[in-house]
Structure formats: structure tokens, C-alpha cells
Image: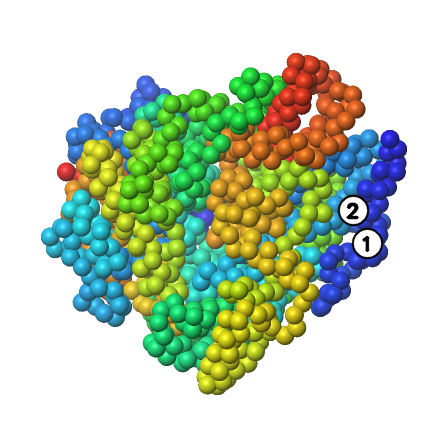
Amino acid sequence: MKSDLNKTDELTRRQFMANAAKTYLGVGLSPMLGASLAGKSMAQTGGKSQAAEAVIFLNMYGGMSHIDTFDVKPDNKEVQGPVNAIGTSADGIQISQYLPKTAAVMDKICVIRSMSNQNGDHARGQYMLHRNYSPRATIVHPTVGSWVMKVKGRKNQDIPGFVTVGTSATNASPGFFGVKYGGIPLGRPDEGLKDSTIAGSVGTEDFDRRLKLADALNKEFHSKHNNTEALAYDELYDEAVRLMKSEDLKAFDIRDEPKAEREAYGDNSFGQGCMLARRLVEHGVRYVEVGLGGWDTHYDNFTAVESRCSVLDKAYANLLIDLESKGLLDTTIVALSTEFGRTPRIKPDNKNGRDHHPGAYSSLLAGGGIKGGMVYGSTDADGNRVKEDKVSTEDFNATIAHGLGIDTTSVLLSPSGRPFKIGGKDGKPVKSLYS
Amino acid sequence: MNYFTKWSLLFSLPVVLITGQVSDAAESDAKWSAKQLSEEELLAAARQIDIRVKKIYDKKNAEQPADASDSVFLRRSFLLAVGRIPTVEEARVYLESDDPNKRVLLVRYLMNSKGYQSHMSNWLIDMLRVREKFENRFTAAPYMDWVRKAVADNMPFDVLTRELLSAEGMLWENGAVGYYIRDKGMPLDNLSNTMRLFLGTRMECAQCHDDPFNDWERMDFFRLAAFTDGQGEINRDVYNSVWKKVRAETELRSPTYNLYDFIGNNIYYSTLAGPGKGRIKLPRDYQYNDGDPGEMIAARTPKDHSFAKGLKMSDRKDAEDGRKNFAEWVTDPQNDRYVTTITNRMWKRIVGTGLYEPVDEYIDPREHTSPELTRHLKDLMQDLDYDLRAFQQILMLTRVYAFASSEHELMPGEKPIFDGRKIDRMSAEQYWDSLVTMVAGNPDKLPTRGKTTYVKYGKAKLDMKTIQSEIIAIEDPKEFKKYADKLLERVQSGETVGSKPKSMEKMEKDMSMEMMSNTNNGGALRGLARASELSSPAPNGHVLQMFGQSDRLLLDSAIKEANTTQVLSMMNGAVEKLVVANRDAHIYELSEGSVKDRIRALFYGILSRAPSESEMQLMETEVEEREKKGYRNIVSALINSREFIFVP
């Protein structure tokens, strides 16, 4: 079985190579051809005219119940349980009663109700959601954020282009692209970029001396151990020092925000994270992920979903309104997804829990040229299977990439010469979501 | 200074420990008796491994790599065995000693220290994904305590496995029930994890469909799940009938409401009934021809020569020993996947490269680099009755462990020849504990979290073990209501509720630890204690989190990737505040005498080696030019060097 798969890999690989060679003849098949992929895609693929410049990716980790949020089944009490559906600012679209503020801005949002994948396991699901390939023992795939870094580069050269907030640090992983393209993982939004100024008792002179002394030791060390991971830290020290001197460091400090603004987002890590995301985008950061956990509602689903939704609703709706009022919504794609949905079946013995359900779930897109007030795809009456217009995790990410003007058919090679694409092997953008 | 005196002070201490008590486990209720191996036996076992490793090289007509230097051996051994760097004294005594036997003594010193328990606890807590709180956000402390005690007692790994897989009863009496309670509501995921953890078998795909990458069918998975099916809470019905009324009749968040809610979440939630029915209903979406949705099927273990002999249960009636049977099958001496998996995990931990990798995807030993070596190691593991400490100690006495570091990167498909550890960034725990060591000296003497026996409820303190056993024994709802109402009165009077009040001192300790683990960003962030004593996982923003500690939600999620926040923290953050600018830090205490002496002491305490001549010159110039500040600059530079964060 395994050897068969390897063969397929080999075939696909050759095919990829041929394609790549054709497209980039003269550019060469080097892993460094990144920058040339950007900007070309509009001419090649048609679709929207102006590319978006930034992405805010909201990661609902744990597996968000689609039926209790964006794919309500009001006529089917057996699967819906106690949740009511409410109308929204978009004609004919109903969502969960837990999301009233979101309902009011539905005209800006595209709901994809036909998400589907094959991973019922959190770790694999999250890996796929971020990297579009299944985990392999032999390689670490780059996350979409680092793809964007690799292909589009920074918009603001002084500060990092990719930041994650309140989510597993692995989601900032650059994989085989190397640390240069990795994100900055922030644990808490209210602490800003911690430790980004020279400590009070140390002057610039001593700071520089310390770096010089360490450099001398490192030279010796690297000459003994030619180790990629150790060398990666050298790059990061340079980067960190540059960052410390940057004017735009204040982008990370949400304490600058007026109190009313902070309250509008919700006084919790996710709400403040969304506000930070907006600040970062304002300052030219390309890709920000903000995480909201607690969706793994095997046990007491409705209590937990309601509490998650109250956090999500406030922050999400306000984020869209805020971006729009600052003129950023047209150039910022706000995406919301999760690793899988949850079963239509409600388990009474687990205080009404719902289990993992990768077969059908919902995700959202808004801003950056996305058509608002629309639903794409649908599920059957139980919310069990996708009825039409199935969208995979890879397709979803490819759609985001397309919005940024990245050619999703282009191939980059890993250092070991294996071919990869931003939307995975089979990801295709759903271009009709863009106006 | 008389180094000999120092030496014997430091390193002969464990001799006492070996003959006396080995750990905290004075009142051990052990269900096993570990073999006590003499030094000669340990060494002889190591030589047997050397012979097998050498054969790998002989076969290739290759020379074995050279031995690592003393300083590499020292640093590596500390970091691998006790999860931290040596203190100034430990480094100096070891490096300046002429004792030809010092490596053996060092390994003994480390493996019998509390640091070993701390470091192994980190490993096990990680593997089992033990978090401070269960999914319902109430304390899981007794489970954590159980795991830590199992390590302190050096519980044989097969016993530990069985205890976890077959546990029943009340959390405050038997913390091992936490293994299933931790995954309450998701017994199938729990089973996937069990298979991966203990048997190196990935079945998570087969939870929902036949696995195209392996041979597992969905039916195999459900037949295994049948062993563990039927978990529930003890006498939950008694509670439910009363709670329903209380919830309807009392005001939300009133004292009565809150107490009943607390009892549901803390007393009943944390019990485990259901010894494993041995049969299970196929799920509603079962899609293959070999069974119908909703059909009752009997437990059966998958057929594969790598597992133990097959085991079947009845599909006619519920059994009383499904989980016990399952636990026996998992740890059966004939179950090659079990012994191979734990052997490989330990081998990789010490030698650096697994017999195969990843360690949770079993590969038939016949395909390994040296089937003979693997067989030998497995036999050794079983001869030692799964004594993980003895096994690791033996590995640390082998030559392959002592090889100099290598930069040999394996190509896909290439089989390892174990030619020296590849340098590897410290784990978050190793890094943090090393910082703690530089601040406080040997951290074994720092306070530990102790055992949690009381839970704070308003002003009252509840002796949970007593209360849980009393409540759970009640079969009659009326009796239960009487008990709960009385409890409310006692709680409101603020008394300590439980059988016998313990000494105040002990109680205060319990409470302070409880408070520490209950805060989200207070105590633990400031607390100067080893990683194993802090909350699990460490709070957001803690150095541990920054350096990639596992979130303990998913298996295998600790990471060692570099990122900018770590670098900022090393230059301006924790390192600066805790160590460099901290005049009381242990690292400065022993730095006395001439400039050269002081610089040497700093090198010992930070990099576990003496400076080279050119390094000494460079640092002397620094001190000359910057005086006092120069020493601080040196400390900061050494900690910020690549050499510091990479395990040699």
C-alpha cells in the first residue's frame, strides 16, 4: 500500500516539475523563486481586479459546531436542540440566536456551509487547516501565513509580517521555508510584543557589547556544529535587534487604544486579540491569526457553544465594523474557520454533547473583495453531509490566497526538491466568492 | 580548595540514597518490587549493549565515533537525566576531578536525585496530557499527584499502564481514574491515544473510516473500543434527581445552587464507573458491509502477529472486566508493540535517535538497523520489569551514549547507525529549569507543589477524599439532599470540612499550592520553581510557553522551533530579570577571587566548561573595560549563546 502511494507521489512530482519548468523557464527550479509568484495571478487567472493586502484568520480550534452557529436547522428540532435561528441583515440568511451582533453585519459576510474534510482528529485537522497537507514524518510543511510571507514578502519592512495571537505556537511555523518566514507567536494580546525594549538597567553600549561577545562564542560553536536550527537563531537575533529599533513597534501595544474601543471588542483574550489584529494590519502586517478555543464540546455542548459565541460574536462583528470604518475592510480578508464541525446527533448521556464531524461544517469569509450577504454551498436537512458545492480546507485556503493575488497553481520546491503549492495538492480557489 | 572533599560531598550522597530510601515514597503502597541492581550489574548490562552497537559498525567496516569530552558528557547527562544544567559547584567538582570512574558516579548521582523525578514527571505529564483542570474546569490535581507519585516510586511502566487503563472509582482516592476522566465524553479519542501512546499504533483514522494508509478497518477500532465502553459516573442518578429540583427551585448562583453545582462538578464528575462492557454498538453512520449501524458487536483485539495473542469477549451480555482484559492484553509480555514502543521511547530519549522514528509508529523490529540490538534492548526492558530508571541508567553507561555529537542528518528511508547525538535545542522545560538553576542553585531543594488534599470553597476548606467517599456512598436521593444541605451549613460557617483536621502548617501548604495552580497569570509566572512544580500547562506568556511547552491538549505537541519572542526574552526579558540583573542569583555567589577565577566560575555555571584561552582573554578585556557591568555582560552573552540552548 505504502509503496503504491509513493509511486503516485513520484508521478505527481514529475508532473509538478514539468509544470513549474514550463511556467518559470528561465527563472529556474530553485526554491527561492518565491517573489515571482506574486502579482502574476490576476493576469493569468482572471477574477477580481484588485488584490487584498492582508489576512486576519480567526481560528476556532476544537471543532466549532456548525449547526449551532452558521448552519442552523430550525425545522429539524432533533438535530437543532434548544437553539433558535434568527434573521440577519442579509435577506434570507438565518444564523444562531447566539450570534445577534454578527447577524447585524451579515451583509458583509459570506458563509460557506459546505466545508468538508476527512480528519476527525484535532491535531491532523489543525495541521491541515494551516498547511494543506497531511502531517508526514519526513517534512514539516509551511503554514499559509508563511507562504504569504514567502510569496508576497513584507509590506512594512521593519516589523514582522506574520503574527499569531492566543493560539498554538505551531500555527506560526514556517516549516521548511525556515525561520525567516515564520510568524511571531504572541501568547497574550495585552502584553504587546514582550521584551522588545532594552531592559532599564542596560544601556545601548552594554547591549551591543553583549551581542558582540555572544557572536564570538557563536562563531566557534558554528564551526564545530553545522546545524541549521542553531544557525536559524542567528537570523532571529538580527531580526529582533532590527525590530527593537523600529518605530512601528507600537503596533503591538493595545494600551494605546481608547477604552471604549477595547470594550467594544470584549474584555477577553480573543476580543483584545482581534483588536490587536486590526492594529497590526493598519501598520502593514500581512497575516494575523487569532485563536479562540473551547469548541470541543463533547460534553454539555449548548452551554459551551453559547459561551464561546458570546465572545466570538462581539469581537467578530466589531472587527468587521472597525475595519470598514478605517477603510481597511476592502483590502483585508477576514477568514474564520475550524478543523471540523460537530455531529448532528446530540448525546444525552454527555449532558447533550456533540462529537467530531469532519463531513460537514461552516467557515466564513469577509472583506478583501469577498461578496457579502451570501451563502455558498449547503448541507442536507440534518447538517450531516454536504449537499452541493463542497469546499475542502485546501480550497478554503486557496481562496484566501487567490484574494491576495497569489497564483495557487504555482509550485515551490522544498530544500529536498519536493514540490508544494499554497493550497495543497488539490486546493482550488472558489473565485465566485469575489466580486 | 580540597576537591576531593567536595567530590565526596556532592557525588557520594546518592550511595546513601540507594541503600536507604530512593524517593519520597516512604509510605509506598507499591504493588511491585523493583530489582535492585548493583553497579557491576548495570555496567555489565551496558557492555552488552556496546557489543551489539559495535557490530553495526563492524558490519559496515567503519570505525565508531570518538567519545565526547568530559564537559559535553557532563552537560548532556544533566540535561537528559535531570532536565537542567549543572550548578557551578557540580560542574567544577566534576570537571576538576581525576577520578577515572567519575562518569559512572555522575550517572548514579543524577539518576537517584529528585531532579530525575521532576524531569520524568514532565515527560509523563506530557505523554498523558495531564492538565491542571478537567474539561469542566474543575481541578484534576489528584490525577497529577498520582502521576508524580508513580514517577517518584519508579512504578514499573507495565504496572503503570495497567493501573491507568483499568482504574475505577473516585478521583480523590485513586488518581489514576483521571486517565479516562481527562477525556470524558470522548472515549474513542481516548482509545486512539492509548493505542498511539502505549502501542505505537495510529488508529485515529479508523475511528471514522477504514484507514487507507494502514491495515486498520473501522471494525477493528470499534472492536477495541468495546473493551472500554460503558464508562460513567458513580451514582450520578442520585445526584441528578435532586439537582433537577434544586435547579428549578433555587435562584441561579444562590449559595444552595452553587454548592449543588459544585458537588456535581467536583464530586460526581470525578468518579469513574463502568469496568468495560466488552461490547459496543456500531455508530449510526457505520458504512461497511461487515456490520450494521446500531448492531451490538463484541470486543476483539486486532489480528496481527505484532500484537499479543487475540482476545475476544461476549456480545450477548455486558461484562465486568472489559478494561481489565484490555489492559492485560496491551501489556502482555508477548505484545511486541508494547515492549518495542516503550523501549524505543527510552532509547530515543537517551541516545537521541530512535531505533525508528516517529516513535509512535511501530516498525517491525526485523526492519530495524540491527534486529539483534532491538531484541536485546527489549529483553533487557522486560528483564528489568519495565524499570524505566534502571533502563535509562544503563543506557547512560553505554558507549553509544557517550559518543561526541554528530551532525549526521538522516535521509528519508535511511536507517540510523547511532553515531552520536545530534545537537538539539533544549526543551522548554530544560531551558526553564536551567534558568532556575542559575538563580537558585540546585533546584532540588526548592519547594515542591506537594499533594493536594483540600479544596477551598469560599472560606471553608473541604477535605475532598472524605467528602467524596461519603457522598458517593449515598444511594438514596433523600439522604443525599440531607447530606448536601448539612454540608452547606458547615461550609457557610467557614469550617474545615473533613474527618480529621491536619496540622495547620500542612494545610496552608496545600492551599497555597492550590492557589498557585488556580491562578491564570499570577503565582506561577512569578514562582521560581521547576517546570514540574508549576501549573500544567504553564500560563500564557510564561517562558515555558514561549519556548514551546506542550499545551497538553494534543499528543506530542511540544515544539522546539525558534522564533523571535524567544530571542527577545533571552536578550531583554526573563534572562535579564531573573538571572543577569539579579545580584542574588546563585551564579554570582560563587564567582569570587581573581578576575580569571570569576570568569571561569561563570563559564562553569552557564556553559558547564572552562573558557578557552582566547575566550578568557576576550572576557578579561570586557571586565577591564566595563568593570562590574562587564560580568553582567558576560553572563548575558553566555546565556544568549547558541551553545547554551543546544543540548550537546
Label 2, label 1: how far apart the Cα atoms are = 9 Å
Q: Name the residue under label 1.
A: B18
- Which chain does the residue under circle 2 lie in? B
The 10 Å Cα crowd at callout 1, few under 14, some 14 to 19, many 20 or more, is some
Residue at (46, 55) in percent of width and height: B214
- Which chain does the residue under circle 1 lie in? B
Q: Cβ–Cβ below 8 Å for labels 2 and 1?
A: yes
x, y percent for residue B255:
43, 70
Residue at (20, 33) in percent of width and height: A327
Q: Relative to residue B6, is residue B317 depicted above or below?
A: below
Q: Name the residue under label 2.
A: B108
A353 on left or right of B351 = left
x, y percent for residue B427:
58, 41
Secondary structure under the numbered disc 2 in the rendered image: helix
In which quadrant will I find the C terminus of chain A?
top left
x, y percent for residue B336:
62, 59
Mark earlier in primary sequence (2, 1): 1
x, y percent for residue B376:
71, 52
Q: Relative to residue A308, is residue A212 depicted above or below?
A: above
B567 on left or right of B74 = left
B173 on left or right of A253 = right
Q: Relative to residue B96, is residue B289 depicted above or below?
A: below
- Nearest the viewer among B381 and A168 is A168
The 10 Å Cα crowd at callout 2, few under 14, some 14 to 19, many 20 or more, is many
Q: Residue furthest left?
A: A91
Answer with the quarter of the image where residue A84 lies.
Answer: bottom left
- Nearest the viewer among A170 and B503 is B503
Residue type, numbered disc 2: Arg
